[in-house]
Amino acid sequence: MKIKQISVFLENKKGRLAQLTKILKENNIDISAISVADTANFGIIRMIVSRYSDAMRVIKDAGYTVNTTDVLAVEVADSPGGLHQVLEILSQNDISVEYLYSFVRRPSERALILFKIREIDEAIGVLNHNGINILSPEEIYEL
């Protein structure tokens, strides 16, 4: 149920993100989800990609600092309060969300949110117990 997320550290300079995406394009690696956070000097690009092992290799070979983190891909109702329901369950069980971002996919009645949670195994158990669907890596990479 854990999804491998790639985090790439980029200098905050014009064209750096385009260089990174060009590497992925040239290696036929698809980006399913992406989040960009920046500071004055650098950015952190978080991505869910097809063939993450290959992506790690080609990004490292290009000289970038890159690592992986486990995240959860959680389905929430695509309506007011859908995200709140999941956050409330986590909060009631003293589980903190470090960050989250949405996953773009075909239209449906469910939204897909990627969660970075330190207590990931505990979160999986709590969410499953409360009937919240967590997608497997295979389900994510098929989208």
Image (spheres, rainbow, N blue to C red):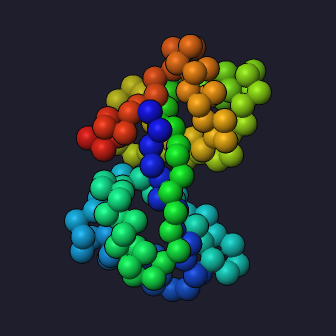
Vertical relation: 47 (above or below) 8: above
Q: Is residue 53 shown to the viewer in this render?
A: yes
In the picture, measured across the screen, residue 125 lies left or right of residue 18, that is right
Q: Residue at x 61, y 64 (%)?
A: 37
Q: Position of residue 126 (x, y in %)?
A: 61, 20
Vertical relation: 20 (above or below) 35: below
Q: Residue at x 40, y 65 (%)?
A: 56
Near-viewer residue (53 or 32)? 53
Q: Position of residue 72 (x, y in %)?
A: 51, 38
Q: Residue at x 42, y 53 (%)?
A: 48
In the picture, measured across the screen, residue 79 lies left or right of residue 92, that is left
Vertical relation: 51 (above or below) 77: below
Q: Is residue 106 shown to the viewer in this render?
A: no
> The C terminus lies in which quarter of the figure?
top left
Furthest residue in direction bottom, as rendered: 14
Q: In the rendered image, which quarter is residue 96 located in?
A: top right
Near-viewer residue (108 or 86)? 86
Q: Position of residue 86 (x, y in %)?
A: 61, 26
Q: Position of residue 108 (x, y in %)?
A: 35, 30
In the picture, measured across the screen, residue 76 lies left or right of residue 42, that is left
Near-viewer residue (72 or 101)? 72
> The N terminus lies in which quarter of the figure?
top left
Q: How many marks?
A: 0
Q: In the rendered image, which quarter is residue 59 located in?
A: bottom left
Q: Residue at x 45, y 49 (%)?
A: 4
